[in-house]
């Protein structure tokens, strides 16, 4: 079950204990255990079908937990960037401002009207992601990189303490990818926002992440990128990944 | 000549009720079209036809039977599409054809197609009664108010349902509200253009507005304006040219769409 408990200050942001998630009879995640400290930059990696997206969806409350528990520290606010918004439908009639405004969390059955404070927050999110000039543009007419910045602004507009991102850079060109990661690092280091990111991007893990969780239905590794690099058992997986990596790495793992 | 036609009470009733119904159809249409659910109007209209046939057989008021029946069926379609292995559009197709068959059987049991049943099949806005006018105004106002109240949530689930769930919106509840409002509006729309054409009141204004606007709120407002123009122009044109009103409204809608499409292409 997914529950929020009152934890003492200084304790971890998220604790996952013996997490099992099933699709019908098929068990996707089988006994996952890990802890994410507040302010961490955690990269979740693993082969296709290893349960990475299932794990972040369970963390975001989108999938039911069959067994085990996910414990959030009190007051934690989640921001979420789903995988499918890598490109918005170009025909969808929504301005950047409208998309970001939809990120202000809903806490009641009836939505409330936007207050001046909400508008200020939307302005702050536009400013944070440096997309003020795009506010009136139609989302579907922007480049992939710009769209992801808008969706990141939507995830940030409610001042989350933890951002969960599911393969956000898969559809981006190398330059946009670099810019996107730089923004995440800025949010993490300057604003203290915790990051949990699903990625296949080996170079990004080495360069930006503070910790790595390697998954294949179970946790095979959880530690620092340096330890991950040194872990002989991981060499096999990373070797496979590196062969498929299309662009130069800033740092070989 | 235009002003002389406005002197007729039946024309006044037709214009006022038509405008209110067009406003609610157009506003809902924007959400339905973008959620790839636009054919729900067609499906619900067919269930409405079955309900009207039933009402006529048992001697009840058609709207009194059709409104709750179609609202119930709308939830059934939603459940069929969501809880079974059927795709949403397949669920609409199944319910729609079954309801049409039921309507034809009921009409046959009732001694064949009556004038009343024909009026719901092809629309008869010029024959609208005072009580139906009041019902149209009240229910359309309720629909528009509920859309206004839930606008932010409706936008969120339409743009990105998964994100909407994470941000705390009860997406299932909002979807039910949307579908129930659609059911209500479809029954009202049946009186304007008929069972066979009611989905045009939902789809055309929305797709016309999509050619013109870049924002969501603006799309809804443009769609509502298109709905009002098409219904008003359709009623006036059909009156002067002695044409069927429902079909004329659809043709005006089509012309507006073509004009918007050409303008949109030229602008881009």
Image (spheres, coloured by chain):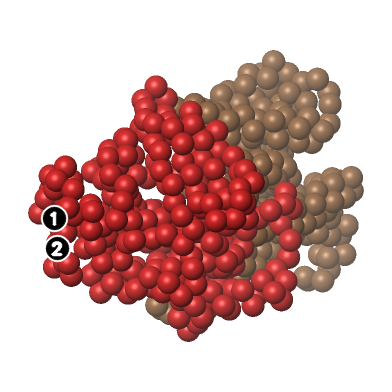
Label 2 vs label 1, nearer the camera: 2
Mark 1 crowdedness (10 Å alpha carbons): few <14, some 14-19, many ≥20: some
Identify the residue shown where x is 10% and y is 54%: A243
Q: Name the residue: 27% across, 40% down.
A: A220
Chain where mark 2 sits: A
Residue at x 18%, y 70% (from the top left corner): A250
Q: Position of residue B48 (x, y in %)?
A: 68, 34
Give the Cα separation between the discs numbered 2 and 1. 9 Å
Give the x, y percent position of residue A94: 52, 67
Counting labels gives 2
Q: Mark 1 or mark 2, which is nearer the start of the sequence?
A: 1
Q: Which residue is mark 2?
A: A252
Quadrant for the N terminus of chain A in the image: top right
Q: Quadrant of residue B72?
A: top right
Residue A35: which disc? none
Q: Is residue A98 above or below residue A56?
A: below
Q: Is residue B13 above or below residue B44?
A: below
Answer whether residue A139 is visible to the viewer in this image.
no
Which image quarter is the C terminus of chain A in? bottom left
Query: What colour has chain A?
Result: red
- Of B191 and B241, nearer the camera is B191
Looking at the image, residue B5 sits to the left or right of residue A141; the answer is right
The picture's colour for chain B is brown
Q: Residue furthest top?
A: B109
Q: Chain of mark 1?
A: A
**Relative side of B64 to A186, left or right:** right
């Amino acid at each position: 079950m997914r529950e929020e408990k009152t934890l003492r200050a200084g304790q971890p942001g998220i604790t996952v204990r013996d997490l099992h998630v099933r699709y019908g009879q098929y068990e996707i995640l089988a006994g996952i255990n890990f802890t994410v400290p507040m302010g961490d930059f955690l990269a979740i990696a693993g082969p296709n079908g290893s349960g990475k997206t299932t794990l972040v969806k369970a963390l975001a409350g989108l999938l039911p937990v069959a067994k085990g528990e996910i414990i959030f520290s009190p007051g934690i606010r989640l921001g979420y960037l789903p995988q499918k918004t890598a490109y918005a439908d170009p025909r969808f009639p929504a301005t950047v401002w409208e998309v970001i405004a939809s990120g202000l969390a809903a806490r009641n059955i009836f939505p409330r009207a936007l207050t001046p404070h909400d508008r200020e927050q939307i302005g702050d999110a536009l400013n944070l992601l440096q997309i003020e000039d795009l506010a009136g543009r139609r989302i579907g007419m922007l480049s992939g990189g710009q769209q992801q910045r808008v969706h990141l602004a939507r995830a940030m507009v409610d001042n989350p303490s933890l951002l969960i991102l599911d393969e956000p850079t898969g559809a981006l060109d190398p330059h946009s990818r670099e810019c996107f990661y730089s923004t995440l690092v800025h949010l993490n280091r300057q604003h203290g926002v915790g990051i949990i990111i699903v990625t296949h991007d080996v170079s990004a893990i080495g360069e930006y992440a503070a910790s790595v969780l390697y998954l294949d239905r179970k946790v095979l590794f959880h530690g620092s990128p340096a330890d991950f690099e040194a872990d002989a058992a991981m060499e096999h997986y990373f070797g496979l990944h590196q062969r498929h990596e299309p662009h130069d790495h800033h740092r070989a793992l | 000549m235009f002003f002389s036609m406005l002197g007729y009470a039946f024309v006044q009733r037709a214009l006022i009720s038509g405008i209110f119904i067009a406003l609610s159809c157009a506003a809902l249409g924007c959400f339905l079209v973008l959620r790839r659910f636009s054919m729900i109007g067609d499906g619900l209209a067919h269930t409405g036809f079955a309900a009207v046939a039933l009402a006529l057989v048992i001697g009840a008021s058609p709207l009194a039977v059709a409104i709750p029946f179609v609202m119930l069926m709308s939830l059934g379609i939603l459940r069929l599409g969501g809880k079974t292995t059927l795709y949403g559009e397949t669920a609409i197709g199944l319910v729609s054809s079954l309801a049409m068959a039921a309507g034809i059987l009921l009409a046959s049991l009732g001694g064949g197609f009556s004038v009343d049943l024909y009026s719901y099949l092809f629309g008869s806005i010029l024959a609208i009664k005072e009580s139906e006018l009041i019902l149209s105004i009240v229910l359309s106002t309720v629909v528009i108010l509920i859309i206004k109240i839930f606008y932010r949530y409706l936008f969120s689930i339409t743009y990105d349902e998964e994100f909407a769930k994470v941000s705390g919106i009860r997406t299932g509840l909002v979807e039910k509200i949307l579908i129930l409002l659609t059911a209500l509006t479809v029954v009202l729309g049946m009186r304007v253009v008929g069972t066979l054409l009611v989905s045009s009141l939902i789809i055309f204004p929305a797709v016309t507005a999509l050619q013109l606007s870049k924002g969501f709120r603006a799309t809804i407002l443009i769609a509502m304006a298109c709905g009002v123009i098409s219904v008003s122009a359709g009623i006036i044109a059909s009156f002067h040219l002695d044409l069927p009103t429902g079909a004329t409204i659809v043709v005006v809608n089509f012309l507006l769409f073509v004009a918007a499409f050409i303008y949109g292409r030229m602008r881009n």
